[in-house]
Image (spheres, grey):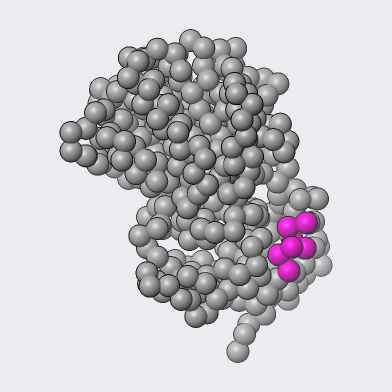
Amino acid sequence: MEKKINLILENGKIFEGKSFGREKEITGEIVFTTGMTGYFETLTDPSYCGQIVVQTFPLIGNYGIIEEDAESRGSFVKAYIVREYCEHPSNYRCEGTLDEYLKKNDIPGVYGIDTRELTRVLREHGTMKAKITSEPVKENEKIDVEYFDMVEAVTCEESFTDKVKDAKYNVVLWDFGAKRNIRRELLKRGCNVTTVPASTTAEEIKALNPDGIMLSNGPGDPKDNVKIIEELKELCKANIPTFGICLGHQLLALSQGGTTIKLKYGHRGGNQPVKDLSTGRIYVSSQNHGYAVDNDELPKNAELLFTNVNDGTCEGIKYTDMPVFSVQFHPEACPGPLDSGFLFDRFLEVIERGGDNA
């Protein structure tokens, strides 16, 4: 028998749906993603840590679960909301159903909700707290969300190195919740990649003698990472070629005196247009963030590189006094789009130039 379940929003709006996955009561920040493909990559993206994720695409789960496509060691989402989920997937690589995966990872799912209406509410009112419960709805229900160190929850526990034959360079990947495809993009370009935990110090990174440094994506409010920001500020003094993505981009800006702002409902999905200000060219990008670097308070040594076509927010920065650049979007996007993968090549070009400014 299908069990009814309630989704209660912070603004008092209530949606009734049906339960799949693990049956449990949870609270969290609710966000939506407009991605039409790659639901498993969404589920395993550490940047969604602690969030209730709504898929706007109506049918999810039709090709099942394919562990090889996972972007991290598991799923860190609080809950998963879809219009309809496929109970009988069809794919030669399929290893299980979406329902089975959610149960295995202790994640509640909700289906049968009008996700179009829910998305309109979130667009109009902004990202908010939400609660999923099977209990009767109380009048003026209060929603409390437990906050925790999200980066600590998703980073690797200890350093490890992936090597390739005849490697050109040694790159350190500072892991704030890194998607696996960042590592894959570097490896296929001939780099050995040493992944280090978020708690690693600047001195420990410099001791590895890297040719370049990657700052990964990750979850949460960038301003919460005070110690990392201080270590990054110190690391930048070493003038090592550095490329930041998503949270790494935001932390870089904060370390150089910039600031970040919370967006009304964020940018999440694989169809976000960004403009290269040096050429005027538009790229379609994959994004997943609720915060952005403030265009009005950029670091003094920063030059705006990309902007979001939809709302004009900062999508990329290059620094004028060090070989460092960063982007808010995801050039390692998996399953796509692949428009901005050239940025990894640009990173290697900066390394090849011996650390000249990006």
Res 94 → quadrant: bottom left
Q: Residue at x 41, y 32 (%)?
A: 344
Residue 65 % position (x, y): 43, 68
Specify whether residue 132 is painted magenta.
no
Residue 172 horizontal side relative to residue 118, left or right: left
The image position of residue 110, as x and y in percent, is: 62, 71
Percent of width and height locating residue 34:
64, 54
- Residue 59's image quarter? bottom right
Up/down of 320 relative to 351, above or below: above
Helix, strand or loop for the magenta stretch, by majority: helix
Of 132 and 2, nearer the camera is 2
Judged left or right of residue 183, residue 38 is right
Viewer-side residue, 182 vs 279: 279
Q: Which residues are magenta?
A: 114-120
What's the residue at 49%, 80% (across, down)?
Answer: 88
Determine if residue 128 is in view.
yes
191 over 302 or under it: above or below: below
Whether residue 350 sits left or right of residue 149 in the image: it is left
Q: Residue at x 59, y 58 (%)?
A: 36
